[in-house]
Amino acid sequence: MISLKETRLKEVKAVKIGKNMSVNELVSGLGDCAFGAGRLATAVEIYETMLKAETTKFLGISGALVPAGMRNIIAQMIRERYVDVVVTTGANLVHDIIEALGDHHYKIGEVEVGPGADKSVDDVLLREQGMDRIYDMVVPEEAFARLEAFLRGVFEKLDSKSRDKGHTIRELTKAIGENLSDRDSILRSAVDSEVPIFCPAIADSMIGLHAWIYKQTCPLKVDAFDDMKELIEIFCEAPCTGAIILGGGVPKNFIFQTALIAPSREQGQEGFDYAIQITTDTPENGGLSGATLEEAKSWGKIGAKAKAVTVYCDATIALPIIMAAVRARRR
Amino acid sequence: MISLKETRLKEVKAVKIGKNMSVNELVSGLGDCAFGAGRLATAVEIYETMLKAETTKFLGISGALVPAGMRNIIAQMIRERYVDVVVTTGANLVHDIIEALGDHHYKIGEVEVGPGADKSVDDVLLREQGMDRIYDMVVPEEAFARLEAFLRGVFEKLDSKSRDKGHTIRELTKAIGENLSDRDSILRSAVDSEVPIFCPAIADSMIGLHAWIYKQTCPLKVDAFDDMKELIEIFCEAPCTGAIILGGGVPKNFIFQTALIAPSREQGQEGFDYAIQITTDTPENGGLSGATLEEAKSWGKIGAKAKAVTVYCDATIALPIIMAAVRARRR
Amino acid sequence: MISLKETRLKEVKAVKIGKNMSVNELVSGLGDCAFGAGRLATAVEIYETMLKAETTKFLGISGALVPAGMRNIIAQMIRERYVDVVVTTGANLVHDIIEALGDHHYKIGEVEVGPGADKSVDDVLLREQGMDRIYDMVVPEEAFARLEAFLRGVFEKLDSKSRDKGHTIRELTKAIGENLSDRDSILRSAVDSEVPIFCPAIADSMIGLHAWIYKQTCPLKVDAFDDMKELIEIFCEAPCTGAIILGGGVPKNFIFQTALIAPSREQGQEGFDYAIQITTDTPENGGLSGATLEEAKSWGKIGAKAKAVTVYCDATIALPIIMAAVRARRR
Amino acid sequence: MISLKETRLKEVKAVKIGKNMSVNELVSGLGDCAFGAGRLATAVEIYETMLKAETTKFLGISGALVPAGMRNIIAQMIRERYVDVVVTTGANLVHDIIEALGDHHYKIGEVEVGPGADKSVDDVLLREQGMDRIYDMVVPEEAFARLEAFLRGVFEKLDSKSRDKGHTIRELTKAIGENLSDRDSILRSAVDSEVPIFCPAIADSMIGLHAWIYKQTCPLKVDAFDDMKELIEIFCEAPCTGAIILGGGVPKNFIFQTALIAPSREQGQEGFDYAIQITTDTPENGGLSGATLEEAKSWGKIGAKAKAVTVYCDATIALPIIMAAVRARRR
């Protein structure tokens, strides 16, 4: 029996706070810490390695990250090619469009949000005021009216261009991006940078609702399954693959299931080579969102020798730190 | 200012454990408790009210509930019309088919599952043994081979019946159910009981993968958006509506967004009339899965005067208790 | 390599809901399920085994279980000797006394508690109304006035009896119990059943506050460390030991650290023989409250061959179910 | 009815990642984001305000922060007077002493820790190797032998100095600090900076165990309640008070209950003026650890007009960021 001590142990060294530290210096300091701190530092190291290795990087986005203020970071990740493929929930695209069309999201004061936090945060009252709430933030309903008009225009163009032919969801997200001029937009950035955006559950969003309304009177054919072709091809052609998963849900599974169908890229090698997962969900309820990356190895979704780490943290905290550190390291 | 005490307070009365209590007696006893106990009892009361009120009941299912052993309960809820519409993740349908085809899921021993829990739960080893893990349970890979053959047969029948016409996802789930003979199957029970099963993110599942493989050589047209029509019609025709949400995700949002597009059913009345949510996710990360039902009121998804409760609990614990109590009360 | 399948796997069998099922029948049905359902059933099996084996059973209580309505169950566990030793937070004792003195806790209406849940649950307003809130429940401040007078009486008696001699905390909890006449009281039940109640962090409670106020004018000597003697003796004399941990915190660690100091009871045998943990905390933050029972084996707190299970669940839900099932099985 | 929009809303502005950003710049950018990001920025703003206002700052520490690598930050907070009073669990002191005596904590490789994560993280094997595990980290048992010898020395000195007189726990923590020479030690830093360290549940730690062993043969009198005097005096004399709560537990409650007994410092003013809470626990289980700071207002623990924020985050991530940003702002 080989002693655990000799082979695998690394001393915990407490981090010190310096004068006006850079994010990168701080993250380096966390590298010898345990728990979330150590994992955050490991995530940055894995990302750095991924970038050096010419990895095709798949980004999964779920949770209301765009309304919470992560829109620029994600657009920047696309423009600067920190990611090469995006799989997202529909809601994040909806809120990206809302911002691109000049509408905004608003924080609810400076107050603690919690049971009985503040008597004026009354959801029935918000309803009367035309404010839709997402935790400690609201979006005015009038933004959705502009969204509807915009989407209708996109559907019409798409329809006139290609009468009989159907579309993939990825073509639809591209068409939306082409009609947005805001360079900070995720959808626009993806078009400019030729990064495909997949959204398998697009029906489950305002885009889906308006697509359906449009279809009541005009033709619009979008196939439920056709996106897989492009996604699988990208995976198979990549010499090396990585996944950055923000928050679980459909995007996490859709990215990982790509690896199930792809023929092993090399002899004895299957699954993603790198994986970073940032989530507040935990494995104990058995659901996929909180499942460990180790579990994914039993399925062949992640390679047996993959470098992988889960950071159990609100992505609105962990993502900016990781990206600030990774950007500082990249050159 | 009216005193809180006079108007809204109800004494907490501690529950007592009787001799060989029935689940219903226990839940009644929890009705005067606070925290999760009280909420569980409230969920049963709301369900009971819902059943008396001729409510059209929408069930949302996410999380690996079928592999964990909730399959019979869900099938029973459908057969006995405790629910009238189902919206689910694809994975739960996949595992329902696997069981219907005679394959099984297996628990990993009696051991604690946790960091370093048991050295033989090694995911790389499981991979070699052809065992795909879901938390403390595995499914043998050979089950997926049978699944593929079965699905191919379903796709062929569907294809031959309706060459040019496309299908909705709900028609696809119905076709699958029609080809299963296991009466304990969720999909089969839904066909028998005329309960529609919607699965907006079906591409994100083994059904999606195999549909896509089939499509490489044969025609199969499934539209991404067409399901909304039937769902919205059901909502609009219902005199009274209720939602039972197990675990968040796409099913939760897809059910609630139905209420956004439906014209108010009565003057001044909009959104669901009843809602029960069972989740282990919490509101603090801002995502929709853990969002409170109050938040849904600001969107008009839930009515201002709706009876609604969230039970923060593993659904594999809360659902059997709720159903055992509700069944005992129904007559 | 022995196949995992042959040696350790057990088929998942879906639970069925029968007519007016007893809690015990339901729990038995959950025994072949996975996730929380399976763990709950395992907890009942371990408890049953523990009772048959003449185990000395240590109960750890943290979280506001008494105010939430778990008081009778805990008192009953003491009276019927489902537990032999109790380690608790001070708060649970405070709320037990409050009920024993005739005061009550109150639920805040039937409303959803969450961000912006209900505008009248305003904590500043509650303060003005003299209502102290614990999540979805309040306790009137006037109850604390009666508590103070009662505790003063206890301290005086204790003081007059034993001028110079100091007391252990356990003697203090016993003295409190002796002065309560309510047979449903945890403290009173413990006196009647000769079950010692330890409360290592008693200073961190209203009992601590009032003890300190009393000490400003009168002598009252309570030693911080002396309780360990009795606790360790109980552990060492027991042929077999079990821990039921509700919610982590100081009680969890205090119970387990007993095993660290006790000389191994038999050759090669150390740590608790049985352990059941019910918690909503998870291991990912590294804290002891959510730590797995496996981790405790590395310390020798739990025996290498112990039967142990963690149920990740609100204790106000899991405890009543477990006790109803265990009671039905015991005879 | 005043419109919510006019009075309390603030536009969400997405954060941008600059070149080699400082932590302070990043946190400033998060200030216009929602969810955890916004709360983290608010925590830094509140801390900054607290420091300008000559606030007496109480730090509560629970969770295994010292073993995880937060020791230097906490020692630095004490030395540079970012905090004026510390209330902690015993375990954090134990691990501080272990490091001060030259022993170390070790990370377990670079692997994912989770169910079945790595077959060599076997807790029974760790037990044989003399390694005690704390999540993804171990401490060698031999460190505890040195701890015992050291503590015995401290107890002897304390005993010889003050035969008959008893000690407070705070005097005990001071005596320990005086016997440590490591300037990075929390206990030593506290002595040097005259910051009192309270540890109400000290019996629940290795210090408690060894104190009790010592007491079997030698006198050592430590009172369970006497610390409150100093703590309350500090609170009452402070013109302005703030609490920084890392992780709940006894330290959180012990700090807040101080406010219950203190006579209102000014007319109409009671409770803490500032509060920052960093926790991974959430309010839904009803326990105090995850309770909102709003709830504390109903008790008078936090002032009605206090500035308060909870950051739901692993403290090993949030604390270093907050301290790096606060330090950069302080001058």
Image (spheres, coloured by chain):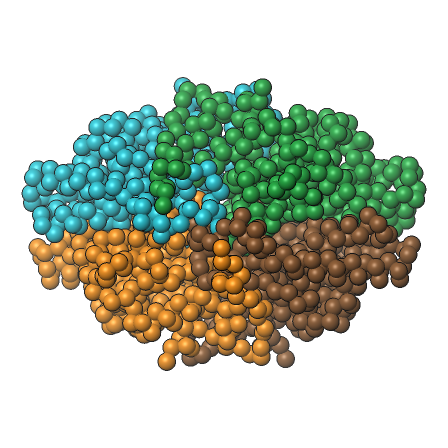
Chain colours: A green, B brown, C orange, D cyan
Residue A156: x and y in percent read: 88, 39
Compared to C14, does D131 lie above or below? above
Total labels drawn: 0
What residue do we see at 32% from left, 49% from top?
D127
Q: Where is residue A114 in the image (x, y as percent from the top left)?
A: 51, 47
Residue D197 position, x and y percent, is: 26, 37
Q: Position of residue B14 (x, y in %)?
A: 41, 68
Seen in the image, is D174 located left or right of residue C142? left
A46 lies left or right of D270? right
Q: In this view, does C186 lie to the left or right of D26?
A: left
Q: In which quarter of the image is the C terminus of chain D?
A: top left
Left or right of B98? Residue C202 is left
Q: In this view, does C217 lie above or below C52?
A: above
- The residue drawn where x is 67% and y is 63% is B98
Screen quadrant of the N terminus of chain D: top right
Quick one: C291 or B142, which is closer to the camera? B142
Q: Is residue C112 above or below residue A118?
A: below
Which quarter of the picture shows residue B51?
bottom right
Q: Which of B48 and C134 is in front in this view?
A: B48
Residue drawn at 56 percent across, 31 percent down: A47
Looking at the image, can residue B302 be seen?
Answer: no
**Measuring 58% from the left and 47% from the top, which residue is drawn there?**
A296
Residue A260 in view, yes or no: yes
| Above or below D184: residue C248 | below
